[in-house]
Amino acid sequence: AQSVTQLGSHVSVSEGALVLLRCNYSSSVPPYLFWYVQYPNQGLQLLLKYTSAATLVKGINGFEAEFKKSETSFHLTKPSAHMSDAAEYFCAVSASYNTDKLIFGTGTRLQVFP
Amino acid sequence: SQTIHQWPATLVQPVGSPLSLECTVEGTSNPNLYWYRQAAGRGLQLLFYSVGIGQISSEVPQNLSASRPQDRQFILSSKKLLLSDSGFYLCAWSLHSGNSGNTIYFGEGSWLTVV
């Protein structure tokens, strides 16, 4: 069965520092992988997704993620954090190859300090 | 462009009372529709999934039910709420294509507090 593990429920960085949010997946089929962001009391917004094209995926707001099959990872990075990046981030994997249903991780809350 | 509307945004209900959360999608036809629940520290849990009118799949056993009376309308209901039903409920949609990898688009969510 597909699953996602997000290492670290909370991550704190200084403004301007590198952001690294970790995601490891388990999938019995080639996965589709997603990162979503959630601002307080709002729904989820798609940051980026991997659908078996380029392994380095660029998303909105300067975020990118690299699919590494050998490490079963899909970590999210941003070179320089901004105060507005403070939010909760969710990694997700497709539940199976013929459905859009997603399995979500438990989320990582990113705090950005001035 | 497509939009998704979900209401009410906030709801406080006593234990044992009924529940109805509504969701509509505009700008697309025959979407896949979803209800997710978000609990602190547990991520998002898929509750119901629908590929068409009257076609509902329940993903987990629970005190809730879902209905899809129209193509772009999805309703989450309960006859008698439990304290454990409290949480943040998210409606979502994706294109009905038969393939995976389509983006799921979320509504703004509904906060339910059962007291």
Image: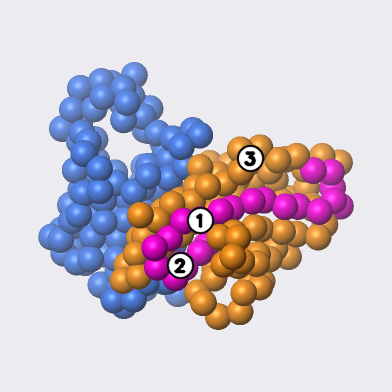
Chain colours: A orange, B blue
- The three-letter code of the residue at mark 1 reads Tyr
Helix, strand or loop at label 1? It is strand
Q: Which residues are the magenta region?
A: A13-39
The chain holding disc 1 is A
- The three-letter code of the residue at mark 3 reads Gly
Identified at 19% across, 66% down, the residue is: B52
Same subunit: marks 1 and 3: yes
> Please, which residue is most extreme toward the front here?
A70
- The three-letter code of the residue at mark 2 reads Pro
Identified at 16% across, 64% down, the residue is: B53
**Quadrant in the picture for residue B33:** bottom left
**Quadrant in the picture for residue A9:** top right
**Quadrant in the picture for residue B12:** top left
Q: Is residue B89 magenta?
A: no
Establish if A74 lies above or below A89. Answer: below
Between A21 and A83, the one lying in front of the other is: A21
Report the residue marked by disc 2. Answer: A31
> Of marks 1 and 2, which one's residue comes earlier in the chain?
1
Report the residue marked by disc 3. Answer: A8
Report the residue marked by disc 1. Answer: A25
Between A104 and B96, the one lying in front of the other is: A104
The chain holding disc 2 is A
- Horizontally, residue B24 falls left or right of residue B65, namely right
Residue B49 tag number: none
> Of marks 2 and 3, which one's residue comes earlier in the chain?
3
Helix, strand or loop at label 2? It is loop
